[in-house]
Each structure stands twice: as structure tokens, then as C-alpha cells.
């Protein structure tokens, strides 16, 4: 397990010179960043020295990859693991239910409820 | 700041007359009794089940003798399992005006409603005589819950509540965080904050129990709206929720109805003990608020990113909105805009102090947004708990 973390002390949203001010890195060990403004497709974001074109809309609060993440790798936010990548994720891409799964409990969206009921053999 | 002095020495910040139905079959009559008093401090709560449940009995006992409550009218159909005589005796022993109406003995719906309204009119005059005494921050118990969370909750409102919790603890208050199902993934980090070595393993055990329970249910404490708001996994939601606890040492574990005796920070274990029997550990945020109040909370700090509007019977709810876009849509329902932090217009410390100041204003009588809008939600369904082990209690 990684050394003691401080999720109760996330970095205040201040702009870091190499990071786009619309993105927030909550902990130095994180491999994802949080959008603190909604990012529209086609807009450009800056991560370290890279300028990356946003491909899909990233709503406020959603995560993007801070670097290339390999399938199976742990996703780190707040300095803590929040699940595992289910696909390779290019830098700047949206990280969400399509490429990240919990290491504890499945995440069901509203449209997944049929699957949840079927898995429990409930009618 | 003045509070209402109860005969057991506890101090309340509200002077509520509670109307309590003891089975769903008495709910309508109880609601009709309360109806003409909707702009007075008369609140409706109750338990729908007909079959006996130790947890529900304890919850209603603690709520009916909560320091914010001045008088209680129980509503029974007459044949349900709830032992109304025992509850009535406990409330009367606490020095509060209390009575029970039994619909089967009172001549039915209309006569019981009339009798109940006469009783409330008289009770309101009696509770108005409750002595007022000085109230200090150290007299307060404050709970916290997050609901309708999104990915801004864990960055703004939750850590800001953590700052307010630290201030409350510094000032001698008792503070409670909860929902062990939303601490899955942070159990080891949390255990490192135990104030005594023997408490750490107990904190981990609580979360492991929650993980087992939710795994059996096959579904975490995770709503579709959480994902729409950018949260992807249970453990991501947990890391954000955990930050509400602040930085104080964790000095004990509570179960619903346990009132902390000493100042400090407590974890409320809300997941039932024993085999999985009663469905999801918490059917909604509302039941968790009721459990915090049953532990003596005078005020509940409710953080939300998606935008919950709920309040509560008995104790005021302070709404802290994490998301600036949500705040603009639902500002009348919110007390504090922690979303300013994301816009660079406030720091976590600024909002933490703002929450602390609003706690004191609320304790002094200032209505919160949900109180002013008439929110008085309440929910109580079956659960089972075993007593706390000795390592869980504050030393």
C-alpha cells in the first residue's frame, strides 16, 4: 500500500505552470487530472509540454489521463488507487466507466439496471 | 447563543413537537394532525413496519428524547407490534409532555385527528415555557453526510466540511461522519487516524463489513447520478466522501442511537450487523440523516454536487453545494456555495470558516434554506445492530 495519503487535503485549485488552469492535479502521484471547467470537443488543453486536442466533451469534474495509461494499470487519484484501467488510455483522454472499473464493486448506470437484475436472477 | 434546556441537562437548538406514527396504518391520521401546524415547529416522523424491530424502537426512543424535541404525540392504530406503552413511558420519564392516541380506541380517523390537534395546541403552549440557557460550541453535536455527490464534492464541499469539523473539535464539540459503505477503499488510511491502537482494527472491520454487505447486494453505494457527475468507481467516491472527516484523530465508533459522551470525531457505523437481511443498508440519504440525529446531532452538514434538496425532521440541515454550476441552478436550496473554490474565488479555509459560522447562526435559531422551504423529510426502515465492542468506545 502506498504511504499515508491526504485525501482530506487535496491541493487547492491553483494553476501549475505546466498544467492547463482548467485542470487540477489532486496529488503528485496521480495519473488522472480533474476538469474544473467543462472542456468542449476541439478545444486545446495543455498537459506538461503537450498541447492536446479534446476529442469528446469533458464535463466539469470528469477525469482525463495525465499520461498514457496501460490496460490493467491502477488509476491513481487523491494519491490513492480508485480502480483499474480496462483499456489503454492515451494522454488527455476521458477516463470514466468505459475504461475504468472498480477493484471493489461494479458501477451500474441507469441503463445497466437490466444487467444488475439479470445477474441477481430477479424479475 | 441560547438553547432549550431539557430536564436531563441536554440543550436543544430547536423546540419541536413531534407527531410519531408507530405503523404505516396510522400515518395518514398523524399527517392530518400535523397539517394545520405546517408553519409551526410540529414535525411528523414514524416507523411503517407492523413487526417489532429493536433498532426501530431504539431510533424512535432516541429521536423522541432528542434535545431538539420538546413534546411528543404517539399515533397507534392499536394492533401493531410496536410497544407504545414502553416508548411513552420513556418519553414521559425524560420530563417531556407526551401522550399516545390509539385510533381503534379513539373512534376512528376523524375523532383521532380532532383529539390530536387539540393535544398539539396545548403542547405548543407548554413547550413555549421551556427555559432558555446559554449555549456554547462545546454543547453541540454536528453530523455530516454527502448526497447527490459528483466529482466536485470531494474537491470542494467535502474537504471544506472537514475544515469546519476540525474547528468544531478544537472548540470542544462532538462531530460524526458516517456511511461506511462510502469509505470502501480508504479503510487503511482512516485506521491510521485512530486515537488509540485498539481502535484502528475496529475501523477497518467496520468498512470490511460494509464491503461484504454491499458485495452480497451486488451493488455499491453508488447512484447513476454519481457517474453522470464524473465519479467512476466506489473507491473514487469514497476518497472524496472521506475528506468530510477533516484531520482530527478518530476517537470512537458509534452505531445508530449511540450518543457520543466526550468531545471529538466519531465514525457512525450505519451498516447492519449479522447476515444480510434487510436489503440495502441505507435506502436513501434521509434515513442516514435520521441516524445522525438519533446519535444526538443538533445540525447535519449535507454536501452535494448534483444538488440534493432534502432537509429533515427534528434537526436542521445545512446544504453545502460543491459544484458552481449546480449552485447557479439550485441556489434557493443551498446555504453555502463551496463551488467558489473551483472558480478561484475562495479557499477551503474560507469556506470551512463560513460553514463554522453558519453552524453557530443556525444553533442560535437562524433557519437554514431547507428549513425555510419546509423540508422535514424522515425515513425509518428495518435494520439490526449488535452492541459496540469495548475497543469502539471513546476512552
Image: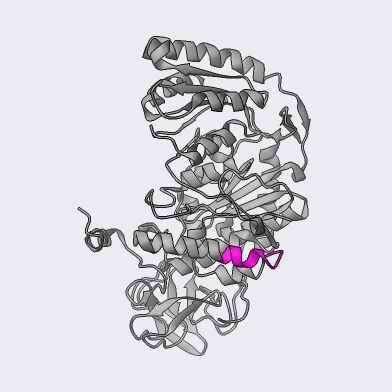
Q: Is residue B228 left or right of residue B298?
A: left
Can residue B256 be seen by looking at this rendering? Answer: yes
Which is more toward the observer, B10 or B285? B10
Q: Residue B109 colored magenta?
A: no
Residue B1 at x, y = what percent? 76, 36
Q: Residue at x 49, y 15 (%)?
A: B116
Which image quadrant for residue B314?
top right
Which x, y percent locates residue B294?
58, 41
Q: Write down the quadrant of residue A24 in the picture.
A: bottom right
B196 magenta-colored: yes
In the displayed orientation, state which residue is furthest to the right.
B134
The magenta-colored residue range is B194-204
Residue drawn at x 61%, y 81% is A3
**Residue in the picture at 38% in, 48% down:** B278
Q: Is B116 drawn above or below residue B189 in the view shown?
A: above
Q: Nearer the viewer, residue B82 or A44?
A: B82
Amino acid at each position: 500500500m502506498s504511504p499515508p495519503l491526504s485525501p482530506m487535503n487535496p491541493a487547492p485549485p491553483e494553476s501549475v505552470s505546466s498544467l492547463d488552469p482548467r485542470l487540477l492535479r489532486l496529488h503528485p502521484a496521480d495519473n488522472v487530472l480533474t476538469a474544473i471547467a467543462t472542456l468542449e470537443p476541439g478545444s486545446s488543453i495543455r498537459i506538461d509540454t503537450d498541447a492536446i486536442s479534446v476529442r469528446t466533451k469533458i464535463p466539469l469534474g470528469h477525469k482525463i489521463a495525465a499520461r498514457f495509461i496501460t490496460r490493467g494499470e491502477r488509476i491513481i487519484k487523491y494519491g490513492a488507487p480508485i480502480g483499474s484501467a480496462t483499456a489503454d488510455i492515451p494522454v488527455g483522454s476521458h477516463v470514466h466507466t468505459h475504461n475504468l472499473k472498480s477493484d471493489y464493486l461494479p458501477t451500474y448506470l441507469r441503463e445497466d439496471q437490466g444487467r444488475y437484475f439479470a445477474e441477481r436472477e430477479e424479475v | 447563543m441560547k438553547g432549550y434546556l431539557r430536564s436531563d441537562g441536554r440543550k436543544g437548538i430547536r423546540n419541536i413537537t413531534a407527531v410519531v406514527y408507530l405503523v404505516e396504518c396510522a400515518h395518514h391520521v398523524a399527517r392530518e394532525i400535523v397539517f394545520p401546524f405546517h408553519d409551526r415547529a410540529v414535525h411528523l416522523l414514524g416507523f411503517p413496519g407492523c413487526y417489532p424491530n429493536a433498532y426501530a424502537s431504539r431510533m424512535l426512543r432516541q429521536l423522541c428524547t432528542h434535545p431538539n424535541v420538546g413534546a411528543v404525540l404517539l399515533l397507534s392504530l392499536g394492533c401493531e407490534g410496536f410497544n407504545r406503552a414502553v416508548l411513552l413511558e420513556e418519553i414521559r420519564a425524560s420530563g417531556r409532555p407526551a401522550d399516545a392516541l390509539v385510533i381503534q380506541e379513539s373512534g376512528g380517523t376523524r375523532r383521532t385527528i380532532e383529539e390530536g390537534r387539540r393535544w398539539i395546541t396545548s403542547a405548543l403552549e407548554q413547550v413555549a415555557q421551556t427555559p432558555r440557557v446559554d449555549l456554547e460550541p462545546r454543547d453541540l453535536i454536528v453530523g455530516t453526510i454527502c448526497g447527490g455527490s459528483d466529482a466536485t464534492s470531494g474537491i470542494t464541499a467535502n474537504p471544506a466540511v472537514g475544515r469546519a469539523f476540525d474547528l468544531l473539535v478544537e472548540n470542544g464539540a462532538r462531530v460524526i461522519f458516517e456511511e461506511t459503505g462510502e469509505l470502501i477503499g480508504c479503510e487503511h488510511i482512516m485506521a491510521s487516524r485512530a486515537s488509540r491502537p485498539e481502535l484502528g482494527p475496529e475501523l477497518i472491520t467496520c468498512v470490511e463489513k460494509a464491503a461484504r454487505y454491499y458485495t452480497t447486494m451486488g451493488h455499491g453505494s453508488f447512484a447513476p447520478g454519481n457517474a453522470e457527475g464524473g465519479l467512476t468507481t466506489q473507491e473514487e467516491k469514497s476518497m472524496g466522501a472521506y475528506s468530510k472527516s477533516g484531520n482530527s484523530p478518530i476517537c470512537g465508533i458509534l452505531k445508530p442511537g449511540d450518543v457520543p459522551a466526550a468531545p471529538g470525531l466519531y465514525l457512525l457505523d450505519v451498516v447492519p450487523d449479522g447476515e444480510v437481511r434487510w436489503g440495502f443498508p441505507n435506502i436513501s440519504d434521509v434515513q442516514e440523516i435520521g441516524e445522525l440525529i438519533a446519535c444526538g446531532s443538533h445540525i447535519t452538514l449535507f454536501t452535494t454536487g448534483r444538488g440534493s434538496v432534502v432537509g429533515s425532521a427534528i434537526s436542521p440541515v445545512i446544504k453545502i453545494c460543491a459544484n458552481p454550476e449546480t449552485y447557479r441552478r439550485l441556489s434557493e436550496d443551498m446555504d453555502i456555495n463551496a463551488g467558489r473554490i473551483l472558480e478561484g474565488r475562495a479557499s477551503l479555509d474560507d469556506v470551512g470558516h463560513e460553514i463554522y459560522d453558519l453552524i453557530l447562526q443556525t444553533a442560535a435559531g437562524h433557519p437554514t434554506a431547507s428549513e425555510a422551504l419546509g423540508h422535514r423529510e424522515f425515513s425509518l426502515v428495518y435494520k439490526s445492530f449488535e452492541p459496540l465492542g469495548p475497543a469502539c468506545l471513546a476512552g
